[in-house]
Image: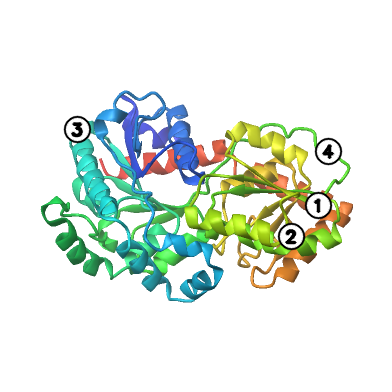
């Protein structure tokens, strides 16, 4: 299909898309809200009218945001204080994934279920009034049941997913949660709360990595699916400091799945190999229990003089931090990491030490785009940092190749083109 053919449907008017998903409390929470904002902005550049319902309050100056009354569902559960005790968290992580998911949801306060139910009601009202030609629903982080609600209420729906869709298709415990929530909330529970979307209800699905696409297919997804990686801005990199000064950088949320504790554990050994080493941490507020763990590790290992914790900074300001530091430390729980921080660091030219990914991962390729370590073996992390720091040729090779891969495959323009083609295909096939 040519670009002209793809736009036949919209010759007389601009197509309108509704983007629904998690009710983020603010625009600086993390990579996913940035990525969804980028998707919306790129579609607008391609002539789409985009209505985005992904914030708990008005965003981007949209006066309609306040009237939607979306509420944040990013609320702590009763297990989060455990994060200050590593032994308990290691025991927790040894449990099967389904049990951890069920327990995490079960131990959330009633306000989580109230807010989730409220958001389903708000999305139902939005769907009835916005007259969108197509709905994009982000599964990850949304109120449980959002995908099923949207699929039943609108004829043209495409799901955007990381690991969320596969988890939902596999989560038979949602049926139990529906009963539990009905008792806890009584009449306040929305009828779609914890109603799983069924494979036949989805017409299209878009995944942010091939690995997540494969997981959803294994979980029973029948709909046509596509992988469209998120993109990042690609400004010209700022000049980098050429003399190595031992400045390490970590950027992320203060949560265990971002791995800061691993780097703090390794830092005393790294310090023996790189005596002048420092670590700059750029972190969101995160979880109280985990923040206490981080503070206790800094005290335990006497790292107060070499660890600096900074609050989150605007996306544009990260470029200066990338230019000022020698190595970015990165960790992901996913087999194919596609984090915006990783992509933006590559684009900026800073060498990266990353956790190992699967063999098909495009971004985290050992000795090609970065140096990889095994998170289960701290000594491999120490060795990777020392090798990267002491080998100028290695730094040059991996940072150059990483930059090439990002510029070839992960630009905002490439992401926007792919979404534009796909969404026009959907509305042309479903007039």
Q: Secondary structure at mark 4?
A: loop
What numbered label is drawn on residue 241? 4
Residue 310 point in image, percent of width and height: 63, 41
Q: Quadrant of the C terminus?
A: top left
Q: CA distance from mark 3 to mark 4?
A: 54 Å
**Image point 15% across, 51% down: which residue?**
188
Q: Say left or right for 316 vs 105.
A: right
Tag 2 or tag 1, which sits nearer the N-term? 2
Circles 3 and 2 in contact, beta carbons < 8 Å: no
130 or 392, nearer to the observer: 392
Please give the name of the residue rendered at 73% of the width and 34% of the height, measured from the top-left corner.
237
Q: Which residue is mark 1?
A: 277
Mark 3 or 4, which is nearer the eye? 4
In three-dimensional space, the C-alpha distance between marks 4 and 2, rounded to whole angstroms, equals 22 Å
Q: Is residue 125 left or right of residue 347?
A: left
Residue tagged 2:
267
Circles 4 and 2, Cβ within 8 Å, touching? The answer is no
What is the spatial separation of the Cα atoms under label 1 and label 4, in whole angstroms? 15 Å
Using the numbered discs, state the Cα–Cα distance from disc 1 to disc 3 in whole angstroms.
57 Å
- Across and down, in percent, residue 41 comes to 46, 31
**In the image, residue 186 lies at what x, y percent?**
12, 57
Q: Earlier in the sequence, mark 4 or mark 2?
A: 4
């Amino acid at each position: 299909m040519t670009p002209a053919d793809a736009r036949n449907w919209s010759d007389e008017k601009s197509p309108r898309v509704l983007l629904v998903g998690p009710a983020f409390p603010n625009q600086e929470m993390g990579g996913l809200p940035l990525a969804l904002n980028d998707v919306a902005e790129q579609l607008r550049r391609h002539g789409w009218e985009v209505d985005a319902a992904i914030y708990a309050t008005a965003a981007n100056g949209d006066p309609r945001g306040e009237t939607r009354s979306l509420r944040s569902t990013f609320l702590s559960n009763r297990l989060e204080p455990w994060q200050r005790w590593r032994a308990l968290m290691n025991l927790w992580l040894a449990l099967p994934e389904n049990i951890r998911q069920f327990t995490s949801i079960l131990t959330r306060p009633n306000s989580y279920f109230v807010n989730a139910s409220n958001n389903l009601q708000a999305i139902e009202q939005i769907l009835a009034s916005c007259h969108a030609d197509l709905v994009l629903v982000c599964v990850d982080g949304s109120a449980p049941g959002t995908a099923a609600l949207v699929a039943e209420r609108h004829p043209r729906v495409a799901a955007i997913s990381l690991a969320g869709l596969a988890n939902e298709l596999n989560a038979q415990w949602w049926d139990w949660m529906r009963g539990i929530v009905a008792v806890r909330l009584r009449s306040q529970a929305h009828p779609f709360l914890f109603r799983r979307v069924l494979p036949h209800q989805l017409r299209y699905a878009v995944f942010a990595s091939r690995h997540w696409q494969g997981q959803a297919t294994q979980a029973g997804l029948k709909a046509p699916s596509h992988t469209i990686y998120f993109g990042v801005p690609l400004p010209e990199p700022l000049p980098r400091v050429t003399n190595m000064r031992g400045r390490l950088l970590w950027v992320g949320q203060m949560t265990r799945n971002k791995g800061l504790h691993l780097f703090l554990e390794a830092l005393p050994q790294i310090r023996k190999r790189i005596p002048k080493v420092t670590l700059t941490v750029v972190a969101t507020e995160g979880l109280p229990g985990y923040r206490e763990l981080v503070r206790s590790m800094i005290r335990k290992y006497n790292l107060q003089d070499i660890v600096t914790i900074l609050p989150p900074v605007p996306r544009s300001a990260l470029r200066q931090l990338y230019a000022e530091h020698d190595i970015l430390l990165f960790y992901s729980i996913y087999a194919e990491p596609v984090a915006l921080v990783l992509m933006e660091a590559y684009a900026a030219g800073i060498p990266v030490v990353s956790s190992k990914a699967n063999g098909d991962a495009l971004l985290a390729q050992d000795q090609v785009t970065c140096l990889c370590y095994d998170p289960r073996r701290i000594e491999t992390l120490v060795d990777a940092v020392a090798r990267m720091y002491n080998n100028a040729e290695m730094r040059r090779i991996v940072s150059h190749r990483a930059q090439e891969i990002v510029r070839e495959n992960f630009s905002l323009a490439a992401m926007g083109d792919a979404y534009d083609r796909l969404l026009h295909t959907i509305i042309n096939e479903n007039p």
